[in-house]
Image (cartoon, grey):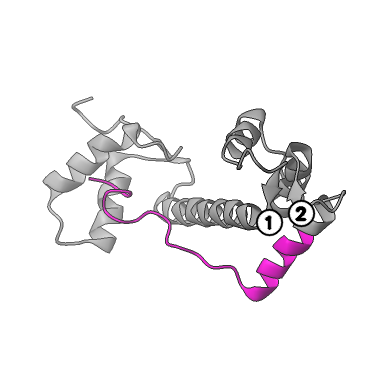
Amino acid sequence: MFFSQAGARPRMWEASPSEHKKWVEVFKACDEENKGCLSRENFKVAVVMLFGYKPSKIEADAVMSSVDPNTSGILLKEFLDIVRKKKEAQLYRNEIRHIFTAFDRHYRGYLTLEDFKKAFKQVAPKLSERIILEVFRQLPSYPLGISLTWESYPMR
């Protein structure tokens, strides 16, 4: 059991009224033909405006494949839902990065087993070492992109 199984996935997040307004304004600015929907290219421009990166072909394909085929693009409601989910994921990644950085005391970009044990002693001092070792053993298969080293773990 790890983050997603333990219920630590991103919580449902709601945009502030000013952020919601910004998203609607970006949608309208990118809806060049005033059709009430965004084309694939206009969606990419909107993502650049809101998140500062151009979506990959795979990301754009995934979004466009989820669009109602009876429309000629992404409707405002769909766009707002996509942006909210992207923002949730961004906040979750930032939270994970912040937690990881707090425990990466040597700024190496990875945690050794000893670092991991010290972190758990701070946040869960009554947790047994056996459980800590089991969690550490499971980490490489968890797709967070957090580097961990096995150098101090004898049973590689």
The structure residue drawn at horizontal position 40% and vertical position 36%, both measured from the top left corner, is: 143
Q: Can you tell which quarter of the image residue 102 is in?
A: bottom left
Relative horizontal placement of residue 141, taking residue 65 as reference (left or right): left
> Which mark is on residue 36?
2
User: Residue 12, image x and y in percent?
Assistant: 45, 63
What's the CA distance linking mark 2 and mark 1?
7 Å
The three-letter code of the residue at mark 1 reads: Leu
The structure residue drawn at horizontal position 72% and vertical position 54%, both measured from the top left corner, is: 50
User: Residue 33, image x and y in percent?
Assistant: 87, 49
Q: Residues within 10 Å of mark 2 (few under 14, many from 20)?
A: some
Residue that sits furthest to the right in the current view: 33
User: Residue 94, image x and y in percent?
Assistant: 52, 54
Q: Main secondary structure of the magenta part?
A: loop
Q: Nearer the viewer, residue 142 or 154?
A: 142
Q: Quadrant of the C terminus?
A: top left
Please tell me whether mark 1 sits on a helix, a strand or a loop.
Answer: helix
Q: Which residues are magenta?
A: 1-26
The three-letter code of the residue at mark 2 reads: Gly
Relative horizontal placement of residue 146, taking residue 139 as reference (left or right): right
Inspect the magenta stretch and tell me whether residue 21 lies in it. yes
Question: Mark 1 = which residue?
Answer: 76
Relative horizontal placement of residue 105, taking residue 128 as reference (left or right): right
> Pointer 2 and pointer 1: residues touching (CB < 8 Å)?
yes
Q: Nearer the viewer, residue 16 or 101?
A: 16
Please tell me whether mark 2 sits on a helix, a strand or a loop.
Answer: loop
